[in-house]
Amino acid sequence: MTKAQKFVIECIPHFNFELSVGLFSGGDRQIRKYEKGKFWQIIRTDGQLALITLKPLGTVDQPRIAVELESNDKISREQKNKAKALVTALLNTQFDLNPFYEGVASDKILTDLTKRLRGLRIPSTPTVFEALVDSIIEQQISLDVAHVLETNLIKAFGDSLNLNQEVYYAYPTPKKLASANIKKLRGCGLSTRKAEYIIEISKMIARGNLDLENYKDYDDAQGIIEELDKITGIGVWTAELTIMRAMNKNDVIPADDLGLRRVIAHFYCNDKRITGEEARRIAEEWGKWKGLACFYLMVAEAMEEINKR
DNA sequence: AGCCAGGCTCTCG
DNA sequence: CGAGAGCATGGC
């Protein structure tokens, strides 16, 4: 018997729902997907699994989100509140984009993009752990391959929820991956090395020796990078990517990233290949907004690619 | 077919 | 120390 609740979340303008969850168009239906104006995924509130389905209401200038929360168990008021907080964090809807738009107004290219992509926000993962594990998986290999492996990992180790004759998966918990064996992770397509990194980091969290969520409250991004860099399997690139996707910070970019270098080169260097150092120097012009600025560039380029077809 | 792909660590010299 | 090998697999 499915229990369901519906509620509405008010957002700070501007917010473009379609653009902000657009990168999940290619997502897996059992994990996280945007399709026909709806976005859905499983969330975890205290041990309870629930499916959230989001739809945009209002306009980019007066945005709201309709949320449907479904579970097989009774949904308490507390769980509903947690779901609300989680959705707010996932879509970063309490963030005011206007200072960013004003902050990059002197940059003609970005000004053009902020007009076209008005209301685009960087979506966030529910947990820092999820962003970190995905970032480790994405080291070196192509994103196409990485996404297959991430899906394999989630379906092999994630808790499942049966709802309306469908099966959905939540991201595996640190506890679950702490007790995973290398062979089964290898079966997901991971290298032995990466399997070891992930197990070891999961163990640190499960034992209470590492609190990734805690880093969200740090103001000093450089400090976070240095801390994470000490952990085996995590370099500067992985730390930066994790911060950008999970911590709602706008001033961190994975400058050495191949894709980001290509995007910056595309808009600012006539597609001539640039080094990570050059990318960092160009991005420094955008100061504390460099993370958001780079995200706008990446989305803009992705849309150009789609339009080419 | 083979080579490359949003890195990182370990091993040599 | 710095350079270089090795890693996983899907796509071109």
Image (cartoon, coloured by chain):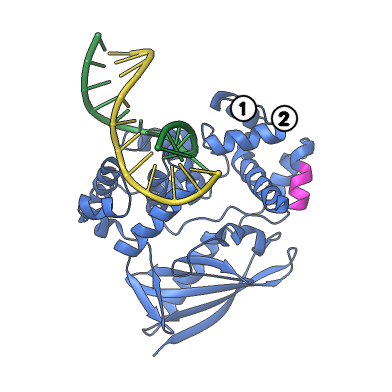
Chain colours: A blue, B green, C yellow
Residue that label 2 marks: A270
Residue A102's quadrant in the figure? top right
Check the image and report above or below for A107 versus A300. Answer: above
Q: Nearer the viewer, residue A272 or A94?
A: A272
Left or right of A115 in this view: A36: left
Q: Is residue A3 visible?
A: yes
Residue type marked 1: Arg
Q: Is residue A223 visible?
A: no
Which stretch is magenta? A111-116
Q: Secondary structure at mark 2?
A: loop
Left or right of A232 in this view: A218: right
| Percent coordinates x, y for residue A220 in the rendering | 47, 37
Residue type marked 2: Asn
Left or right of A286 in this view: A178: left
Farthest residue in the bottom direction? A1
Q: Nearer the viewer, residue A129 or A85?
A: A129
Q: Quadrant of the N terminus of chain A?
A: bottom left
Q: Residue at the spot x=21%, y=52% of the render?
A: A183
Residue that label 1 marks: A273
Q: Residue at the spot x=70%, y=53% of the render?
A: A309
- Dot 2: few (<14), some (14–19), or many (≥20) neighbours within 10 Å? few
- Dot 1: few (<14), some (14–19), or many (≥20) neighbours within 10 Å? some
